[in-house]
Amino acid sequence: MGDIFMAVCTLGNVRAEWAVGFASAQQPAGRVLHLALVKNMSVADARNYALNTACAMDAEYLMFWDDDIIPRQSDAPKLLITALDQHPEIDVIGGVYPMRRDVPEPVVVEREGGGYSWCWRDGKVHPVYMVGTGFMAIRIASIKQAAPNPYDHPGVDVPIGEYFRTEDFGDLGQTTDDYWFAEFCKHWKLKQYVHGGVIADQIQDYGEIMRVEDAEAVMA
């Protein structure tokens, strides 16, 4: 079993609730874990930098754990890594967490163009079109089959491959790095999955906790 590169994409300040959850998390046993705090970059640039670094060091897996995602289980990182260990057909797997909206739907899309999905509620692993990048594990051997376009970033000595991008289309809205990466995976035939047994909350910088249950429609 190879090394795991865990990247925390952060602006430098985190909530105490997140820090406590991160410190108490159970990491995969028997592996060398490389932890990197990637800051002073946009989200997409930070993800690209981390993924390029993981490829260069020939890690087995890269894991993203953003500084606003709080998994409910202390063994959440182990669950994602174990799924990759057990199922070589999975290239990318992510947990379930809510959007930052009044209706905090899960950042999971089962079918392209099908809207946000609740297919994960049985607690099992499902193939999907898109899953949130904020709590995600990636098989590096799979991602190395792709050929991302290189670009220069200030402060980085060599060009880095573009796996993620955020684009603003004005009145038409914004393409998030989650959707960009979903399209990247589709183009390179990489398979994304969601792990329904890994549920996380998202915390706002002022302390509000977003939960996917708050988007559930309650029947009379």
Image (tube, rainbow, N blue to C red):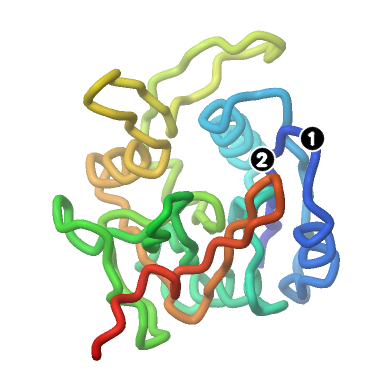
Residue under pointer 1: 12
**Residue type, label 1:** Gly
Q: Would you say the residues marked 2 and 1 are in contact, meaning their CB atoms lie under 8 Å apart? A: no
Q: Position of residue 196 (x, y in %)?
A: 43, 78
Please tell me how many numbered marks the rendered image carries.
2
Residue 55 vertical position relative to residue 210 in the rendered view, above or below: above
Q: Residues within 10 Å of mark 1 (few under 14, many from 20)?
A: few
Q: Position of residue 155 (x, y in %)?
A: 71, 11
> Residue at point 67% right, 61% down?
2
> Residue at point 49% right, 63% down?
97
Q: Quadrant of residue 46?
A: top right
Helix, strand or loop at label 1? It is loop
Q: Which mark is residue 202?
A: none
> Residue at point 56% right, 36% down?
47
Left or right? Give the position of 57 relative to 168. right
Residue farthest to the left, as pictured: 113
Q: Quadrant of residue 147?
A: top left
Q: Position of residue 74 (x, y in %)?
A: 72, 77
Quadrant occupied by the C terminus = bottom left
From the image, state whether disc 2 or disc 1 is nearer to you: 1
Report the Cα–Cα distance between label 2 and label 1. Answer: 9 Å
Residue 73 vertical position relative to residue 11 in the rendered view, above or below: below
Helix, strand or loop at label 2? It is strand
Q: Residues within 10 Å of mark 2 (few under 14, many from 20)?
A: many
> Residue at point 59% right, 56% down?
61
Q: Which mark is residue 9?
A: 2
